[in-house]
Amino acid sequence: MLPILAAILAFITIGGLGWAFVGGDDSSSQALKRAEGFTTPAARSAKAKAAKAEANTPEARRKSIELQLKEAERQDRKARMTMAAKLKHAGLTMTIRTFAIISVSLGVVVFLLAFLFGPNVFVALGAGLVAGLGLPRWVVGFMGKSRMKKFSAEFANAVDVIVRGIKTGLPVHDCFKIIGKESPAPLGPEFQKLVEGLGVGLTLSQALDKMYERMPTPELKFFSIVIAIQQKTGGNLAEALSNLSTVLRARRLMGEKIKALSSEAIASAGIIGSMPPVVMIMVSIFTPSYMTLMFTDFRGQIMLLVGGTWMAIGIFVMKRMISFKF
């Protein structure tokens, strides 16, 4: 029994010493490291060139573009969430505190007016909440969408200006200055801010990122991706931007076709959504006593609340059905 235990202890001791001296790596990995250390600078340079050539293959570029598009989508979702970002999208310079004060003041005023002239305190409270929480946010969102729509409509023309400027020998920075001076708002002011950011020491990628925070449109993100890839891999920037301009115009044309094909569904949704309020208003005008009970009686108020809830759900579903992302 003692010889067996001694043999086991000796095996464990030898194995532990071997593990300590080897360091847990196998001999193949250590041999590979030693071989890499003995390679000549010419071999290392050839290996680096091979890795660079592999990175310039169409498959590697496709993967790089795919990763950048996923990152752009994630940043786009993040950029659209906060109220501060929505104020930037709308081109407003007010702070969150100012916006909150305006919203609360508007809600209080509407609540007091509805409470003084309305039949029920709950109706007044609902009107105050809608005016304080919903209306300012809707106005800011509408302003932001309208501003981004105008920006996207003129962005392809701005890319064409850059392409023509590069072909005539102008630097990209001068092309940005021309766009800032000649283009209409909001495209021109945004490029003026881009030029100002480059003037204070920001890199082009950093300035474009800040521009994307103010104007998170897919067109601008595509432009940033093209610029980033050109800076990393090189190539003809004018040709790449010319192809981007063609893609942007084709994308806009596809959007107009989708809008035309879905116009019937949009008109049907508008008619269906507007019929109940229109009928209620007409009945209130011609037979006021018939509709008064819906506002004065508690059961009528419950019916109005339930009907309004179902109407809101139906309008939301129809809007989701006719909204196309491309």
Image (cartoon, rainbow, N blue to C red):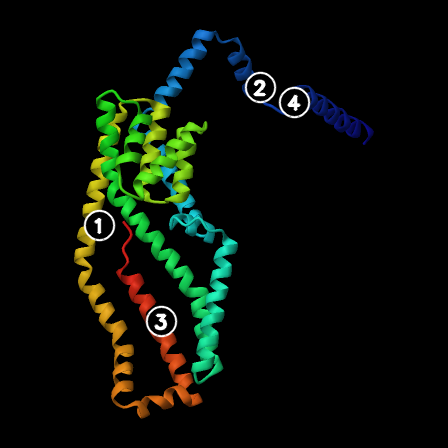
The first of marks 4 and 3 along the sequence is 4
Q: Amino acid at mark 2?
A: Ser
The kind of secondary structure element at disc 2 is: helix
Front residue of this view, candidates 216 and 63:
216
Q: Residue at x 30, y 41 (%)?
A: 187
Residue indicated by mark 4: 23
- How far, Cα to Cα, is label 3 from label 1? 27 Å
Residue indicated by mark 3: 312
Residue indicated by mark 2: 27
- How far, Cα to Cα, is label 1 from label 2? 61 Å
The first of marks 4 and 1 along the sequence is 4
Residue 200's disc number: none
**Residue 290, position as x, y percentages in the image:** 31, 91
Q: Amino acid at mark 1?
A: Gly
User: Mark 1 and mark 3 in contact (Cβ < 8 Å)?
Assistant: no
**Residue 250, position as x, y percentages in the image:** 19, 42
Q: Which image quarter is the N terminus in?
A: top right
- How far, Cα to Cα, is label 4 from label 1? 62 Å
- How far, Cα to Cα, is label 2 from label 3? 69 Å
Note whether residue 26 is visible. Answer: yes
